[in-house]
Image (tube, rainbow, N blue to C red):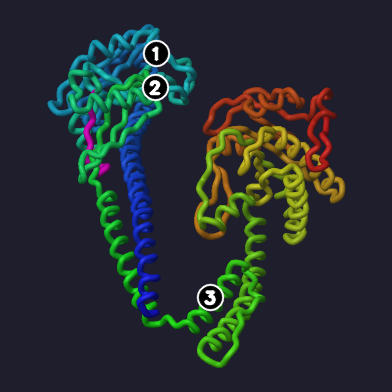
Amino acid sequence: MNLRHKTLLLTTLPLLGLMAILYGSFSVILQRSYGRLERQDAQRNLQRVEEVLAGDLAQIQSLTEDWAAWNDTYAFIRDGNANYVESNLSKYAFESLQLNLVAFVNLDGDIVYGTGYDLINRTFLPLPPGLVQQLTPTSPLMQFEHLAFHHQGLMVVEGDLMLVIVEPILRSDATGPARGALLMGRTLSPGVVESLAQRTRLNLQLHPVTPAALPETLRPVLATLEADGDPAARPTLIRPQDANTLAGYTLWPDLYGIPQALLEVKLPRDIYRQGQVSRHYLGWSLLGSCLAFTGGMLLLLDRVILRRLLGLSQQVQHIGRSNDLSQRVPAQGSDELSDLGNQINDMLGELQISNEKVAQEQQKAEQLLLNILPAAIAGELMQTKASIPQHFDEVTILFADIVGFTSLSHHLSPIKLVALLNQIFSAFDSLAEQLDLEKIKTIGDAYMVAAGLPTPRDDHAEAIAEMALAMQQVTASFQAESGEPLEIRIGINTGVVVAGVIGTKKFIYDLWGDAVNVASRMEASSEPGQIQVTAATYERLKDSYQFERRGSIAIKGRGEMETYWLRGHRPEALFCALRRGGIQPRAR
């Protein structure tokens, strides 16, 4: 057997074995990956249906809330004025609002007015007896934890699935006391389900879970979903029906958490078929690569060339693994391989210079990004080129505004005015860094800082309290040094926020949520030299800090809110407080 035959045998057999191993392992990986993608796609489609239905439910809730918090409704529930029904509850109203049921119930459980409506036949119907029995004064539907509370969800009414909203009847300014409840409902008729299928572009069906209405083939599916745990957790089940169809199932509970509907979505198995095609392409590509490589080896292999080329390749690989661009490959001789070695050395030299320049510029860019965004968010942006907004359950936000700063513009030049503002905010930045807080932004002479994000911390409220007290000291120092009438007004709130970076240019890390709006209102309604906090922040700080109850004040968009003045540390907790960043606690 000559050398060519030996080379053919020694190269072909390992390549064929490697091809078989790669094909087998890659086939398993592809099959599992496409299967996982198929299940994830089915779950996303199930979730998409739920989101569309949740949108319908939100639409009905907004409508019910508008009617329930209305002075006319508030008066109607007591006097039963027939003009109210004639003006507002005509056939046109039910058809335009797509409602099948309306009930006005007073506190005694008496139905002041209630009717059903058949949207197909355009006729009024009496209220279903089964629904009337659930509108007693002791019924869960008539119990509201507070004036802004409401019930919403799915309900079975005389065997039909219905989206139901129950709101307390209040005045137009959303104040009480409640005089009863308003119930509005929309039946999930075949037409509504068909509309849901068209909006989601899915082949879906909604089955009541009653034994009489549920098909025999779906009863094992129901048993499996019910065995998965709490129905309120919305368990899902994905099952292939054949090579072309995949079915997804999920349970929908009613207002009381009892499963009442089984959602079935049938999907084409496009991902599965694509996986089969990918496996075929993989097999043919591996076989073609094996044949091409073997032919190339027979034409180009030469003992001397192979040895030198192998040595050159190993040296280049070593440089690549070590990432040391100062190394060079040996380039002895005067043939093409020597020229290749010299060219590689020249390229390594150029790469070394370019790499050093890139490293310097990258360091500058990373430092600039770290000065703009939190380190965790900056790292995420550098890694993925995108930042996913995060939800935080416990965050304390501080808004501060320098009182009298606008009046300074009348006797200070713009440059001096900005310089003074820069000095004050630079001092605030130093405080935020010492206390490990996250400065969010400045707008004019307003300053915003938060604690508890992007890295959650248990003492977020205490850290913000220390920041607020220290800011008062800093402002007082600047007032004494400059002789200018400077005072600071501060507002603090604790709650749930969503934080993240939006857009692709001029990044800014910002917060959204009702807690942010309330914190801003606390600052706006505060007084010069004072720190106003909400009840949520007060509850977290009352054991370690001194407060003075301000009382209930009117807050735009929120009505009356209980607020407090933060005065300082409690005497017994003054020397036990955490001294973050060298800032000493202050008592007043």
* Furthest-left residue in this view: 121
- According to the picture, the residue beneath numbered tag 3 turns out to be 313
Q: Quadrant of the C terminus?
A: top right
- Disc 2 residue type (three-letter): His
In terms of secondary structure, where does tag 1 sit?
A: helix
- According to the picture, the residue beneath numbered tag 2 turns out to be 151
Q: Is residue 281 above or below residue 170?
A: below
- Disc 3 residue type (three-letter): Ser
> Measuring 57% from the left and 74% from the top, which residue is drawn there?
316
Crowd tier of the residue under label 1, counting other residues whose Cα lies within 10 Å: few below 14, some 14–19, many 20 or above: few
Pointer 1 or 2: first along the chain? 1
**Cβ atoms under marks 1 and 2 closer than 8 Å:** yes
> Measuring 51% from the left and 56% from the top, which residue is drawn there?
384
Which residues are drawn in magenta?
197-208
Crowd tier of the residue under label 2, counting other residues whose Cα lies within 10 Å: few below 14, some 14–19, many 20 or above: some
- Disc 1 residue type (three-letter): Pro
- According to the picture, the residue beneath numbered tag 1 turns out to be 140
In-front residue for pair 385/283:
283
Mark 1 or 3: in front is 3
Pointer 2 or 3: first along the chain? 2
